[in-house]
Image: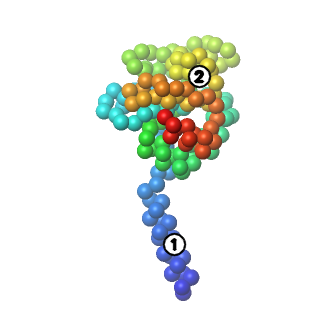
Amino acid sequence: MKYWLFLMIGLTILGCKSKGEPKELTWLTIEEADKIAQGKNNKKFIVDVYTDWCGWCKVMDKKTFTDPEVIAYINEHFHVVKFNAEQREPVQYKGKTYEWVSSGRSGVNRLGYELLKGRLSYPSLVYMNEKMEPITVSLGYKEPVQLLNELKGL
C-alpha cells in the first residue's frame, strides 16, 4: 500500500512540474519576425539558416532544438526563425523583396546570402537584436551545451 501511495505522489509531482515546461520551440517565418520587430518587442532573434539537404541541420533540429534546457532558455529570451537559404519563393523582409538566384548546385535566396554575409555554410545561426539588426553569425552545428553557452554570452 505504501508503495502505491509513494508512486502516486511521485507521479503527481512529476505531472505538475511538467505542465509549465515548454515542450517545443515556436518557429516563425522571416516575415512574421519582421512584423514582431516593428512593434514593441523585448526579445532578440535567432535565425536558423538551413537547407533541405543539410544533414547537420537535421541533427540540430532533432538533438539541439529539442533539448528541454535549450527550449526553456530560447523561449524566455528569443524569438526563433527558420529560414531555408535555398527557398525559391520570394521573401518580403524590411520592405524589400529577396529573390532566389541560380548559384552553385542549388541556388540561393538573396536574403540567405545577405544574412550569412556571403558565407554559405549550413547550419548557421544569425543572432539579431530586438529590431532584427544583425549582431553576429555563428557557423556550424551546435550541441545543446554549446548553444546555451553561446546564447548566454550575447
Q: Which mark is residue 10?
A: 1
Relative height, residue 24 to residue 94 (above, below): below
**Crowd band around label 2 with a 10 angstrom C-alpha radius: few (<14), some (14–19), many (20+):** many
Calculate the distance from the C-alpha at mark 1 to the C-alpha at mark 2. Answer: 48 Å
Q: Residue 86 carries which label?
A: 2
Which residue is at 51% across, 46% downward? 71
The quarter of the rendered structure image containing the N terminus is bottom right
Which color scheme is applied? rainbow
Q: Where is residue 114 in the image (x, y as percent from the top left)?
A: 52, 17
Q: Is residue 95 found left or right of 134 in the rendered image? A: left
Residue type at numbered disc 1: Gly
**Crowd band around label 1 with a 10 angstrom C-alpha radius: few (<14), some (14–19), many (20+):** few
Q: Which mark is residue 47?
A: none
Task: Give the mark nearer the N terminus: 1 vs 2.
Answer: 1
Q: 32 or 117: nearer the eye?
A: 117
Q: 126 or 35: nearer the eye?
A: 126
Q: Where is residue 107 in the image (x, y as percent from the top left)?
A: 62, 17
